[in-house]
Image (tube, helix red, strand yellow):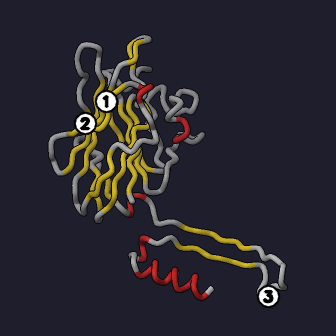
Amino acid sequence: MTGLLAGLIAIQSAFAASDIPTGSLTVDRTLLRVGARSQLGWQITYPGKVTDLVDVTTTGTIVPKGTLKMKVRTLGIAFQSGNTLLPCEASWSKNGSTFTRFFYGTGPSVVPTNVLIDTTVNKNDKINFGGRGWSGSSWYPFHNTSSSDKYVVVLENGDRAPTYAPAYNQASAKSFLSPYIDGSGKIKIGPQDLIILWECSTAAPSTTYFDMQDIVILVTFE
């Protein structure tokens, strides 16, 4: 036990207090006979919501509050014309730089576990994400988080997904997106994650074609 406590103290000294999970450890008895077993119980509270690590502006620009590791994955692409699957691209920009593509392809090319961006971002960096779809002959408009735009939205755990028809009851959510939406239409992701949704067509928000799930990416901070 002494060795364990010493190790925990050493770990704590290496990190800021806000970075360390907190909790309690309980045991069901104070003394044990040889060969007997005790029951341990524990409860762990992890560091706070993503908003403790970053600010998300009214447009969707992400601004870190400190030096962080940022990882980005594409969860799904659902874009097509009739029965023809069409590709989308997703890009990112830091501090006003030119947008750099990190994904291009159709739905079947998505591997949700692949980390497509693994980088360090610094305090007050301005991180933006953009996306667009291919019509079959030309690109649809590019929508990004640096300006107010109904065609792209940044959400964190507990936020209500857009209510544009017909998206975000679980029956109409694409299979890759439904695990991230609960029965009440709220986003359910990790406490240090953001999910970004795009509509890549020119459909109006009031139409059934406007479903805000043409591109879905997951952004995680550590």
Q: Mark on residue 104?
A: 1
Residue at the disc numbered 3: 31
The disc, 3 or 1, on the residue closer to the chain's N-terminal end is 3
In the current view of this chain or complex, which residue is farthest to the front? 35
Report the amino acid beneath label 3: Leu
Q: Viewer-proximal residue, 79 or 202?
A: 79
Q: Is label 2 in a helix, a strand or a loop?
A: strand
* Residue 149 at least partly seen: no
Q: Is label 1 in a helix, a strand or a loop?
A: strand
Task: Tell whether 121 sits left or right of 215.
Answer: left
Give the alpha-carbon distance from disc 1 to disc 2, as whole Å.
7 Å
- Assess whether mark 3 and mark 2 are in contact (beta carbons under 8 angstroms): no
Residue at the disc numbered 2: 101
Vertical order, 36 against 163 (above or below): below
Rendered location of residue 204, percent (x, y)? 34, 23
Give the alpha-carbon distance from disc 2 to disc 3, as whole Å.
61 Å
x 28%, y 57%: residue = 120
* Residue 55 at least partly seen: yes
